[in-house]
Amino acid sequence: MDESLSGMKSLTPWRSPLADALHRNRSQPYSRYFQLATVQPDGRPANRTVVFRGFLGDTNQIKIITDTRSQKCDQILHQPWGEACWYFTQTREQFRLAGVLTLIDANYPDPQLQKARQSTWQELSDNARLQFAWPHPGDTRANSDSFSPPKSDPTSSPPSFCLLLLDPVKVDHLELRGDPQNRWIHLRSESQVWSTMAVNP
Amino acid sequence: MDESLSGMKSLTPWRSPLADALHRNRSQPYSRYFQLATVQPDGRPANRTVVFRGFLGDTNQIKIITDTRSQKCDQILHQPWGEACWYFTQTREQFRLAGVLTLIDANYPDPQLQKARQSTWQELSDNARLQFAWPHPGDTRANSDSFSPPKSDPTSSPPSFCLLLLDPVKVDHLELRGDPQNRWIHLRSESQVWSTMAVNP
């Protein structure tokens, strides 16, 4: 990464409040869960809970994992914009992160991102890996045997395993505990520079 | 309500599991919060935390409140479909409720729904009512005096107060604690009859 970009990254104004929230809510495992909204091909919204898997290297892209057979993959291919809503219950604050979603599946050409996909697979628990060998999500319930596949190979991800990246361009941070409440909107310009504005809650 | 409709209502298959979840997670006030996804006029999704305000009378419509000045109102006028994602942290289960959203503002013609809007206003806390007299949400932060308006009249709602109803036609219920996991999809047919299918998680 060249110095100018790296310098800008260090100025990303929402990373420090988000890191604080993750730290201050760390006693609850579900503080790493957030809700990801996408749009279906018919124009209606979809919304589900996903798990925060950290950031991609030294970028601001949020890592999520998904099954290529899940409906969100089709939705993202059709409309790559998503919005994450992340509510922290202990500190009573919300981050809304809007940006473009990128699906890194087994056929994604970029070798660096393919490497990130593999390392994300390796970092999963055995139980999390198992789910990618389960029967097709959303189909009529299969018999229980099919949910006990042989243990997955941690060194080699299956084709159903997909790394999903959210690259925020707008982050709306609301603190309910403020008096009255505090709210900031962080926006990334086309030249990749972030600006912050205090707004009414 | 005529008997046939009332009979169907008693068969709504997701009401009992949702009532159980609300009961079993009642020690956390945030178990009444969920994330509501809508679609912006530009086709991108939006997502924010809202508060469950109960059901409208003996219907399956979920009550939410909103400020007519918030962006979600414009979004809903443009695309009335929404999806709520409701994750219960204690019992580790998720409900995704998809359906049509209806905005009941001060000008909504139906007298029954106008009455529901007024009673919802009366049931709010003083603090919750105060927010509808705050400066325009999302605008550049106003000075602190403007966040201390005189106490709102509990008997008369301001024009900014809007009752928002979500009428689910599809409810996707996931229990992470199952072994492996349990998931059901409840669907409402055009003749208003609900059916339930056990599906793969």
Image (cartoon, coloured by chain):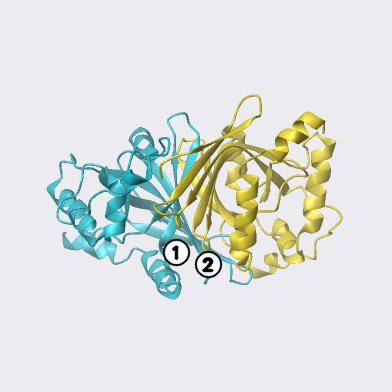
Chain colours: A cyan, B yellow
Q: Residue at x 36, y 32 (%)?
A: A78
Q: Is residue B100 above or below residue A62?
A: above
The part of the image, by quadrant, that contains residue B73 is top right
Q: Are marks 2 and 1 on the same chain?
A: yes
Which sits earlier in the primary sequence, circle 2 or circle 1?
Answer: 1
Q: Quadrant of the image for the N terminus of chain A?
A: bottom left
Looking at the image, residue B101 sits to the left or right of residue A16; the answer is right
Q: Is residue B185 above or below residue A125?
A: above
Residue A30 badge:
1
Give the chain of mark 1.
A
* Residue B156, image x, y percentages: 85, 53
Q: Residue at x 77, y 36 (%)?
A: B108
- Which SS class for mark 2? loop
Q: Which residue is farthest right?
A: B155
Q: Amino acid at mark 2?
A: Thr
Q: Which residue is farthest top?
A: B191
Q: Amino acid at mark 1?
A: Tyr
Looking at the image, residue B4 sits to the left or right of residue A104; the answer is right
From the viewer's side, name the closer residue of B144 and B96.
B96
- Please indicate, yes or no, whether residue B48 appears anywhere in the rendered image: yes
